Every structure is written in structure tokens, then in C-alpha cells.
Amino acid sequence: MINKRKTFYSIALALSMFHLLYGQKDCSRPASGLTPLTDFESGEEFMGFTGGLYGNQSNQKPDRYREDAIRISWQVKPLNAKGEVDPDGVIGFIAIGASNPRTEFDAFTRVAEAHASINPKLKFVNTCIGGQGIQKMNQKADPYWVQAQKLLDSLGMDVQQVQVVWIETENTANGNVQFPACAMELTAEYQVLLKTVHEVFPNVKICYLAARAYSGYAIPVAGGVGKGLLHPRDYYNGWAVRFLMDKVIAGETGYRYSGDSEEIPFTTWGNYSWSDGQVARKDGFFLDCQTDVGADGLHLSSLGEQKVGQLMFDFFSREETATPWFFESITRNADVGKQLKEVRVASVPSTQGMVNYFTSDRYSKAMILSAQGILIGEYDTDTGNAVQTGDLRPGIYWMSLFSQASGWSRPSPFMCY
């Protein structure tokens, strides 16, 4: 089993090294002036399109889609090889992509597995292979899936146990940079890939789509980096995911994720890794050309891999669809409180200092925990179904309420933004 895994990674490494040998980096190239999707201001547009991960300058899930997201995320449970819920089973979490996603997911896995509260039922499986663009993985019979199956076999896992999928990909052979057509082409390819993922992994619950990092430091040279990986396709890659989200949320044919007409798994945003070169985003993230990017201007250095891996970990630590299964303490608390009363809690601006909940019952105390299960504090409630917390940092939290009659309620998630 171990030898098989080493063979798989040797092949992946060899393919990714092929690209490293044919490319050049130019750190003097100026920033593009393009705005990260996450940073659009009110009224700002790009070629007639509003920004934001979900359009109209919003980085928050629309209400109905968000409700579906949370409902589906609670369906992620440990499964055995037959795909049956089993406390002794595992939650398969796989990565799909080429060389950069491969090293990014490895870095993310190292950060996650070192965290004391990570759910021990999670099994990270990196199926990424260097040089394998979306055009080489869109059919179930493609060699990419043959290799993925071999890796699962080597780890003693079954396709039935895969429930969470993280994808970062691109059509490496397509050099079209005419926007919005180029992004919409990739959106259509993503739809085919998602249908294939649904076929290969029948129990997948959630697919997270990540946007590529900046590639503007890479100089196009003969025999070098694939034309589909060069700038500005790195920027348009994020727009492709954005356009796909528009279709998923609208429930367009081919993009439906629930009911009898289900065609793809539930799909949502993963980490957004693009910044305009060395210009920091509003959240401070950027990749330094000298220290974070490799010699070909495309692949990341070990420091860059670590930076994106941490970005991914921070995303899943705060992502409400990951809350039920990513951290062990939260899943344990949820299981303990399964038969207790559930109270709906409203998401709030992080600076508001007041968290509201909705129930006809009377509660006297509230307990708030971080997404990692760390106690933030215990608070007295007021007569207006509100808890005065003071400022909370942006992120996912849990609230449990106490009454003398019924004890503590089931922990309920809410977001500060």
C-alpha cells in the first residue's frame, strides 16, 4: 500500500517538475490593476459585471442558497466502505487539480492535521496530478480517475466514503483571454467536471471551488508554461467560478444540486487565492514574487505553498458549511445535543456587539464558542431574545442557551461578518 502511494506521488512530482524546467520568472512586471473579486467597491464593475463572490459586490451566500448549504453540510457523516453511516467510518476529503493545487492541498493538510481540534474522522486524499488540466479529467474514463482510484485503494478507502471535494483547475491548453467568453467556457467545463465528480463519488455532499493564484510573474516562452495558465487567465479563472455560482444559485438546468432533478453535487466557493501581484488585498493576502513564487513564475515556493495552505485552513475554519464536520469538538457537541431543543441564531455584523436568537422559550444564559469549539464566554440574556457580547471578530461561532427547565439547547451556528 505504501509503495503504491509513493509511486502515485512520484508520477505527480515528475509531471509537475516538467513545467518547472520550462519557464521564467520576472518580478519586475507591474501589477495588472485588476480588482480581486472579493474587493469590489459599491458601484464598481468589470466589463459590465458587478464584483463579489456572489455578485452585486456581495461575498455572502444568498439566504435560500445558504439555508441549503447549511442543511446539506449536516449530512456529512463518517461512512464505511459501503457508504453507510458508521461511527467507525471516515469522511473522505479529496483534492482535484494539477501541480499548484497538489502542493497547496498538501500544505493545507499539514496545517489541518497539526491542529488539536481537527476531526479525526477526516481523511485527506490528494488526487491532484501535475499537468492535468480540466480538459483531461472531464470524463469518467479519463486516466486521471484511474489514478485517483489507485490512490484510494492504496489508502484502504472506497469511493463511497468521499463526501467533500476541493477543486482548483484550469484548461491548460486554452489560451483564450477574451472576457467574458473565456470565463464562460471554463464555467461550462466545470459543469461537466462536477457531473463527472458526482458519478465517480456517489456520496459526495459538497464541492468547494477555489480560484487560482496570480500567475503574472510567468514569462511566456516557447515550450514553457501552458498557455491556459498564463495571465490574465488566472484572474478570469475566478470569474468562471463566479459565473458558475450564478447558475447554481439560479437553479439553471445542468446546475441543479437537489431533488429529483439533481445533476451535480452541492457546489460553493472555496478559498479565493488571487491577488494583483504584490498588491495586498483588503484582507492583507498577497504572494511576494521573490519569496512565494518559484523560478518559473507559476509554481509556488515552499513559503508560497505554506501561505496558500494557511489561507485554505483559515477558510475552512470560518466556513459555515464546514462547521459540522471539520472540527472534532463541534461534531462531538452537536452529537451530544442532538435530542435537545434547537434555537435559530441570526448572523450579525462583527461590530454590532449584539447577537439575536429566535425562540418562544425563555433562556437565562448563553454560551458562545468559536468554530474550533473554544469557549468565547458565557453571557446573561435579556428579555428581548438578545445577547450582548461586545465585538466579535469575523468568523463562524456557536451559541448554546440555558434554561432551568430544559438545560442547554443544541449548539447553533451563526456568522459574524
Image (cartoon, rainbow, N blue to C red):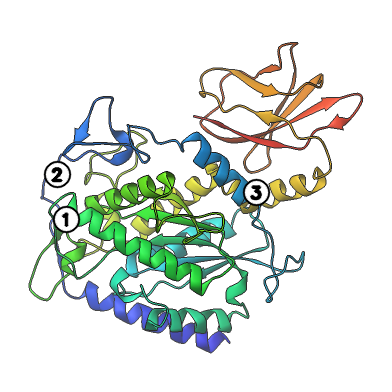
Query: Are discs 1 and 3 less than 8 Å apart at CB?
Result: no
Tag 2 residue: 32
- Residue 65 located left or right of residue 216: right
Q: Which residue matches tag 3? A: 324
Rendered position, 225 above or below 7:
above
Give amino acid for label 2.
Answer: Ser
Residue annotated with mark 1:
231
**Mark sitting earlier along the chain (2/1):** 2
Please identify the quarter of the rendering in which residue 298 is found. Answer: bottom left
- Mark 3, Cα crowd under 10 Å, few <14 / some 14-19 / many 20+, is many
Report which quarter residue 146 is drawn in.
bottom left
Query: Label 1 is placed on what type of residue?
Result: His
Q: Nearer the viewer, mark 3 or mark 2?
A: 3
- Is there CB contact under 8 Å for labels 2 and 1? yes
Q: Is residue 215 visible?
A: no
Q: Which structural element holds mark 2?
A: loop
Mark 1 to mark 3: distance in Å? 37 Å
First of labels 3, 2 by sequence position: 2
Q: Residue at x 76, y 66 (%)?
A: 86
Q: Amino acid at mark 3?
A: Pro
Crowding at label 2, few (<14), some or many (≥20) Cα neighbours within 10 Å?
some
Rendered position, 238 above or below 41: below
**Camera-nearest residue between 320 and 243:** 243
The local crowd at label 1, few if under 14, some if 14 to 19, many if 20 or more residues have their Cα within 10 Å, is many
Helix, strand or loop status at disc 1: loop
Residue 319 location (% of width, % of height): 53, 44
The answer to which image quadrant residue 228 occupies is: bottom left
Q: Earlier in the sequence, mark 1 or mark 3?
A: 1
